Amino acid sequence: MTEDMKTQLLEEIRIARNNDLNAPRRIADRTRTVSLIKMTQVVLLPGYYHYNNLTPESALEQLAEDMKSEMTAALCFSGRNMMLAEELTREFLNRLPKIMRILNTDIQAIYEGDPAAKSKAEVILCYPGFYAISIYRIAHELYSIGVPYIPRIMTEYAHEKTGIDINPGATIGEYFCIDHGTGIVIGETATIGHHVKLYQGVTIGAKSFEKDENGNPVKGGKRHPDIGNHVVVYANATILGGNTVIGDHCTVGGNVWLLESLPPYSTIVHPVGEDQILTRAESE
């Protein structure tokens, strides 16, 4: 391809692109944001995670520098004061001990909740549920101090790697256990208490959205359920709605579709139908 051909093609693409999608030269970058995850993992759990041969000390130093740079870009792109980047970076770094303390409880919950887990090391190294939770914990602290873009990039990276979709805005208590995990969805305004266990395919989601006068979904507002403490939700259950509250010590069975609240100590299961077993001859 000649230089003229490349220039013409890129110009045609630029013209075809909607104006509101034209980005400045520097925005929050996915690749650099993933590196922030990996450096944070080295700082929190050295020996279990490795990145670019960094020690915990060098990882922390590099994390501080790169986090400030990415925050500056994210703040700029969102139209906010870039000078906040240093303060926000310092606030995030100060929260790393808190993140580690909570991760201790998540590791314990997964280890105790799965008979197949032979050790806590196995949980850290092998379990996609812990991998997704750990990235969520990092992203949630960034979200809670008002950092734009970066938290969502982080949790979508975890989503890509594990099939577990946790919005960084969700509020999740300690001792959180995800078993298997593939297909789990937890929405932005969901709250989940302590000692909660979710199995694969669970959705903690929203009902259909309200529309504005132009027919577009209304942004913001409480859209996702509240899950109490000591709750177990089995595979492929769906719990929807911002007014739905699942009380403490509830059990939600597999494949349940739930749009209403449950009082504490409730158990709800999907009705069991009469399954028909056919021999090969009968089915033909």
Image (spheres, helix red, strand yellow):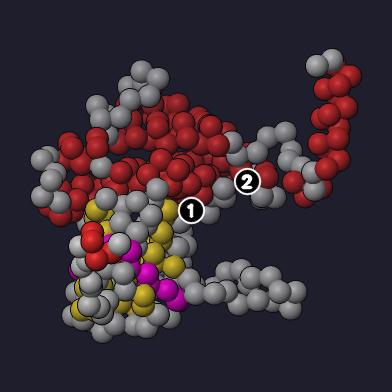
Residue at 20% x, 62% y is 279
Q: What residue type is labelled 1?
A: Tyr
Crowding near pointer 1: few (<14 within 10 Å), some, many (20+)? many
Percent x, y of residue 247: 27, 78
Residue 226 falls left or right of residue 120: right
Question: Is residue 128 among the parts visible in the rendering?
Answer: yes
Q: Distance between the residues labelled 1 and 2?
A: 13 Å
- Quarter of the image with the C terminus is bottom left
Residue at 32% x, 22% y is 55
Q: Nearer the viewer, residue 72 or 126?
A: 126
Residue 195 falls left or right of residue 115: right
Residue 245 placement: quadrant: bottom left
Residue 218 falls left or right of residue 11: left
Q: What residue type is labelled 2?
A: Leu
Percent x, y of residue 62: 45, 26
- The residue that label 2 is drawn on is 75
Residue at 12% x, 40% y is 119
Q: Main secondary structure of the magenta part?
A: loop
Q: From what the image shows, is residue 198 above or below residue 262? A: above
| Earlier-in-chain disc, 1 versus 2 | 2
- The residue that label 1 is drawn on is 143
Residue 231 falls left or right of residue 147: left
View extreme (top): residue: 2
Circle 2 sits in a helix, a strand or a loop, which is it?
helix
Q: From what the image shows, is residue 161 above or below residue 167? A: above
Q: Assess whether residue 234 is covered by the magenta stretch.
A: yes
Crowding near pointer 2: few (<14 within 10 Å), some, many (20+)? many
Q: Which of 223 and 67 is in front in this view?
A: 223
The stretch of residues the image draws in magenta is 229-242
Q: From what the image shows, is residue 213 above or below residue 51? A: below
